[in-house]
Image (tube, rainbow, N blue to C red):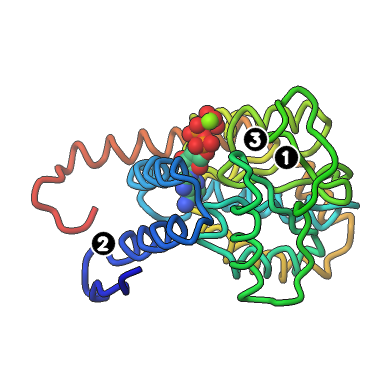
Amino acid sequence: MAEFKVPKSHPRYWSLYYRHKIEEALEKGILAKAGTIAHGRGEAFDYLIGEKTIEPAERAMRTAVAKLLLAEHPVVSVNGNVAALVPKETIELAKSLGAKLEINLFYRTEERVKAIEKALREFDPDVEILGINPTKRIPNLESERGKVDEEGIWKADVIVVPLEDGDRTEALVAMGKFVITVDLNPLSRSARMADITIVDNIVRAYPKMIEIAEELKGKPKEELEAIVKGYDNAKTLSDVLIHMRNRLDALSKEGIWRRREI
Ligand code: ATP
Ligand code: MG
């Protein structure tokens, strides 16, 4: 794979940087081809929210972290896109939450599982990784899409399934899991089905969630419960749509032609 040579001064440096990570992951067998399409779809929505973490996303993150800290069996799921973009942060987040890590793939092949395991072990050779030999199945999903680890998602009460397919999110909710997703598209089925939807780029969301986890870790249970109790995911999704509408409205009035920054 050719080196990433774009100068930092390029106005779209970070976007190109993460595209390069996606290309690399495709070459290493970490990512299925469809994962590149999902990435592009995410980028399009990131333009609409303004490529920054918005308040409704921050609210969702705080609640998600509180819920995960209160959980008995929290699990953070990893797929190809996640392993391509935030391998190190995924491990750190699971650690600061005391959660298990599970490789969980839509297009599951043993090669891809191995490649993702390798990518994660580059950052922590001893990290515990579930989902390598899954023995259980999510009901109502056909075989490869349904495989989960008995010690992980199968017995989890709260799970983080970022950049997830809507059908699987729905099947997990139907199993009685409390589902947290990270998804730039507020209109996707995953975003609409999850219990908590974080509409943000995972490259911004995970570092932020690690910070929040460090902050909330020592707090009394009652305080965490109060955060969870006051949360309304329907309102979060509506607030994201309102943010997008207002932003587009303002931009259309100000005009965007030949503007360098928007
Ligand atoms: P549905 O949930 O309706 O099935 P979909 O078919 O778009 O939606 P997938 O392609 O399985 O779902 O999931 C990928 C999702 O992840 C997309 O909604 C996409 O917008 C989102 N996404 C892609 N890249 C990122 C990223 N870096 N951060 C956050 N979300 C992302
Ligand atoms: Mg889908």
Q: Position of residue 166 (x, y in %)?
A: 59, 30
- Between the residue at mark 2 and the residue at mark 1, the CA separation in whole angstroms equals 33 Å
> In the rendered view, would you say 45 is above or below 119?
above
Q: Where is residue 255 in the image (x, y as percent from the top left)?
A: 14, 42
Q: Mark 1 points at which residue?
A: 179
Mark positioned earlier in the residue sequence (2 or 1): 2
Q: For this view, does 116 lie left or right of residue 74?
A: left
Q: Position of residue 187 (x, y in %)?
A: 49, 29
Q: Name the residue under label 2.
A: 12
Dot 3 beta carbon under 8 Å from ligand 1: no
What crowding class fits label 1: few (fewer than 14 Cα within 10 Å), some (14-19), or many (20 or more)?
Answer: many
For the point 69% across and 27% down, the residue is 170
Q: Mark 3 points at which residue?
A: 233
Mark positioned earlier in the residue sequence (3 or 2): 2
- Between the residue at mark 3 and the residue at mark 2, the CA separation in whole angstroms equals 32 Å
Q: Which residue lies furthest to the top in this view?
A: 140
For the point 67% across and 33% down, the residue is 169
- Inspect this view and state whether residue 54 appears: no
What crowding class fits label 3: few (fewer than 14 Cα within 10 Å), some (14-19), or many (20 or more)?
Answer: many
- Residue 154 falls in which quadrant of the image? top right
Question: Total of numbered circles in the picture?
Answer: 3
Q: What residue type is labelled 3?
A: Asn
